[in-house]
């Protein structure tokens, strides 16, 4: 059985779906007893994970597991689990943004490498799904206001992360490997917004605002300080130097990484109010 933590997140949910397609027995960790996951998936509350037996591999989402990651991995080692696949971030290798966020990923990488299981680390670029945060203002104003228009990243489609995670969870030869998962196109923020406009069939302007304006707007919307800290800190650095671009997805999956334009086209309904994730 494969254990998926963060199973209702964008990567976890797609990984559960891919495993279900091949009939792999999967346990999905969620606090939601009614989570809408594929038939046959065993739903496991975080408090019940310690009682599970027969787990062969674990997908570890640091945000979902938090401080419980150490106990989870120690127990996995004691009960015969073979491997852990960790969702980490490219910032561990290519620093950007506030150091405290990078250190959190570094700490959980160290934990995975030292836990005694075979490990695979997936250092991911910014997820395409992060741009769903623009949906509200696109619906309300027909534009996107943001700071640091020149910030460039090779955003990764979370479905590609899930495809690589599925490989690493089910095949042994990814042990002791660290992969850098990015898209193949380095795009500025206005270029990403234009791709959403293309998907919607209308021009979509990017309106530059100051970092302070964006921060105040986020705090006024009730978001925790951490959210603008994380976002604006990394955008400031990516405006100075673009985020990394690799071909790891292509090498691992034998096809190019999905483009941001494809992601925008596949998610266009989320920007018109037809779909919310
Ligand atoms: N977004 C990015 O650009 C990016 C880049 C690099 C790495 N990452 C990492 O990739 C991982 C996967 O991200 P994701 O967006 O797919 O999903 P995620 O943030 O890991 O969330 C997945 C699920 O975890 C549960 N969860 C969230 N916070 C929790 C908490 N405090 N306590 C217990 N459960 C909690 C929720 O499920 P239930 O409500 O169903 O319990 C949530 O739906 C994260 O660890 C993230 O740090 C993200």
Image (spheres, rainbow, N blue to C red):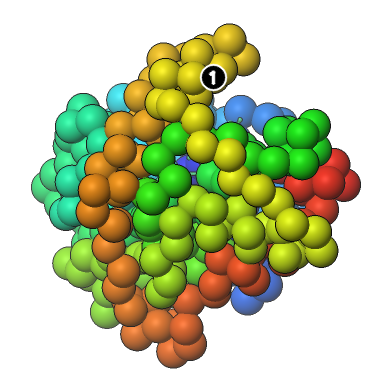
The picture places residue 18, in percent across and down from the top left corner, at 61, 68
Question: Quick one: SS at disc 1?
Answer: helix
Q: Is residue 249 visible?
A: yes
State the residue position of label 1. Answer: 218
Circle 1 packing at 10 Å, graded few (<14), some (14-19), many (20+), is: some
Nearest the eye: 18 or 45: 18
Please report the residue visible at 17 percent of the width from the left and 67 percent of the height from the top. Answer: 176
Left or right, residue 158 beside residue 183: right
Left or right, residue 22 beside residue 202: left
Nearest the eye: 151 or 161: 151
Nearest the eye: 206 or 129: 206
> Which quarter of the picture shows residue 182?
bottom left
Work out whether 44 lies above or below 84: above
> Which quarter of the picture shows residue 196?
bottom right
Please report the residue visible at 14 percent of the width from the left and 44 percent of the height from the top. Answer: 110
The picture places residue 103, in percent across and down from the top left corner, at 18, 34
């Amino acid at each position: 059985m494969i254990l998926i933590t963060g199973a209702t997140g964008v990567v976890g949910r797609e990984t559960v779906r891919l495993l279900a397609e091949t009939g792999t027995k999967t346990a999905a960790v969620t606090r939601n007893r009614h989570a809408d996951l594929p038939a046959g998936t065993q739903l496991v509350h975080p408090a019940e994970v310690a009682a599970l037996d027969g787990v062969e591999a674990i997908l570890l989402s640091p945000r979902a597991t938090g401080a419980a990651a150490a106990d989870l991995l120690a127990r996995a080692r004691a009960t015969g689990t073979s491997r852990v696949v960790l969702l980490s971030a490219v910032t561990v290798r290519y620093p950007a943004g506030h150091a405290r966020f990078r250190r959190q990923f570094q700490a959980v990488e160290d934990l995975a490498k030292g836990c005694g299981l075979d490990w695979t680390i997936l250092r991911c670029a910014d997820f395409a799904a992060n741009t769903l945060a623009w949906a509200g203002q696109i619906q309300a104003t027909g534009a996107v206001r943001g700071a640091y228009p020149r910030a460039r990243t090779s955003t990764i489609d979370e479905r590609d992360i899930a495809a690589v995670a599925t490989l690493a969870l089910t095949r042994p030869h990814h042990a002791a490997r660290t992969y850098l998962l990015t898209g193949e196109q380095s795009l500025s923020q206005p270029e990403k917004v234009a791709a959403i406009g293309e998907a919607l069939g209308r021009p979509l302007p990017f309106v530059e605002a100051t970092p302070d304006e964006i921060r105040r707007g986020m705090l006024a919307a009730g978001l925790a300080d951490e959210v603008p800290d994380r976002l604006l800190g990394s955008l400031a650095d990516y405006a100075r130097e673009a985020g990394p671009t690799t071909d790891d997805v292509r090498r691992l999956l034998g096809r190019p990484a999905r483009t941001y334009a494809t992601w925008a086209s596949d998610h266009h309904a989320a920007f018109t109010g037809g779909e919310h994730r």
